[in-house]
Image (cartoon, grey):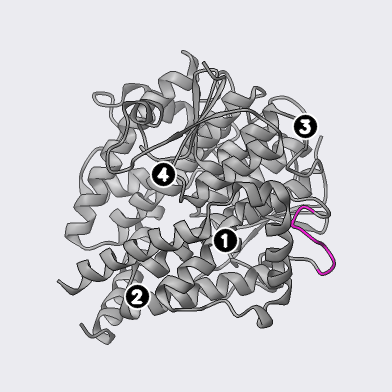
Amino acid sequence: MADSNVKVLGTWASPFVMRVRIALHLKSVGYEYVEENLLEAKSELLLKSNPVHKKVPVLIHGDKPVCESLIIVQYIDEVWTSAPSILPSDPYDRAESRFWAAYVNDKFFPALRRVLISTEEARKVAMAEILEGVVLLEEAFKKLSKGKAFFGGDNLGYVDLAVGSLLAWIKVIEKFTETEALSEAKTPSLAAWADCFSSHAAVKDVFPDVDKLVDFGMKLRAKFSKAATAAAATTTN
Amino acid sequence: MAAVKLLGVWVSPYNCRVICALKLKGIAYEYIEEDLLNKSPLLLQYNPVHKKIPVLVHDGRPICESAVILRYVDETWPQNPLSPTDPYERAVALFWIKFADDTTSSIAMIYLTTGEEQEKAAKECLEMLETIEEHGLIEGKKFFGGDEINMVDIAFCSVAHWLGVIEEVTGLKPFEPHKLPKLKSWILNFKSVPVIKESLPDIETMLAFFKGRREMVLASKSS
């Protein structure tokens, strides 16, 4: 049942925004999507809805703003209680899901970002972290999926959204570094899962075009290296 | 064998969060002090990914990451609920718990850095405290949880107890209580709760510990 009065403020390239949209699709909740142009100027609505961080995604339900992608996903799961649930029902399983989502946010994503924007030395270190990370995620997948197609079992779950939203960006850094992160040889379960995830009905319309994302990634990289060079020029030892 | 075990380090605010939650709910637990320079096989077994404390072990199964542990404790033992029941209020609470994680890291940066880096760390910490004052604390509300403390209050234990110690040890004082009156009141209220008083580590012992740590930081920077 579509719920009116739901807005999502986001950008097409953001994996965090993608998580929110997938969650709403899974719950069959209709929403208005507002594309923010973060490189130009942030909208009044964004600044008002997320005054602390001024970031996307923001979910606005009625007049109430919810910020931080994983928090928004949990909110969606709790408000729209139609099946399927995104988080498991057992407290220990929930804790495991939250643990892996936190790992993705706190360790894996920052390493991805460093691969994209760092200079060569730091990039190598970051890429090594990514290669270790996918091995961890492969093990996590085998444990959580219990032989089914997704981390969440038969349906997309919290960890699927947390990890899956990064797949396009993983492809970007694979192209950039000319290194395979996910492969049938090294991470067979994740490689199979990645196909299932990206072709899922709730995902495919918001999965970004990888070539477009590569272009965007290179722009981001240029922007950050300019800033880093400028900062280095103004600091003294 | 105790059904609930906590692997921790006495001086960690993340560890303190878990102790506060367990005590508030009246949950009996066995505490195991870890030596982070010599991590136990148990810790490495229970938290192979991060090898960090705190780790809660319940009926032999480990739960890692303090924010995840807080929610697990609250969902498993329903007495003295530590989070709002309304989904929106809960989303707001989770937002501030994440903010508390960032604030706790920024407080640590003040004693871990020197020179310009340290000035930057102090400035960032102050900005976070100002954000808490402006957006997190509501006039007239005693705690983040309302009349009773909840997991948001617990998550901010670093602000209530660690910040003052770090300020004393480094001589940098980003927090000026008269400028942030709501935060000043919250700290007093929080530290007056009997269970919290019992759970916070002793100040003198903390001062000695952080003085030693600070000397190590300064020594490593000057070589």
Q: Nearer the viewer, mark 4 or mark 2?
A: 2
Residue A207, above or below B108:
above
Residue occupying image coordinates x 77% and y 52%? B145
Residue B117 tag number: 2
- The boundaries of the magenta stretch are B139-145
The residue type indicated by label 3 comes to: Gln
A99 or B178, which lies in front? B178
Which corner quadrant of the image does residue A119 belong to? bottom left
The residue type indicated by label 2 comes to: Glu
Residue occupying image coordinates x 66% and y 71%? A47
Q: Is the magenta stretch mostly helix, strand or loop?
A: loop
Q: What chain letter is assigned to the residue under label 3?
A: B
Residue B128 appearing in the image: yes
* Magenta stretch contains residue B202: no
Q: Are marks 1 and 2 in contact (CB under 8 Å)?
A: no
Q: Quadrant of the N terminus of chain A?
A: top right
Mark 1 and mark 2 lie on one chain; the one further toward the N terminus is 2
Q: What is the tally of numbered marks visible in this picture?
A: 4
A87 or B160, which lies in front? B160
Q: Which of marks 4 and 1 is in front?
A: 1
Residue A168 tag number: 4
- Neighbor class of circle 4 (other Cα within 10 Å; few <14, some 14-19, many 20+) is many
Q: Whole-Å distance between the Cαs marked 2 and 3?
A: 44 Å
Q: Whole-Å distance between the Cαs marked 3 and 1?
A: 26 Å
- Is circle 2 on the same chain as circle 3? yes
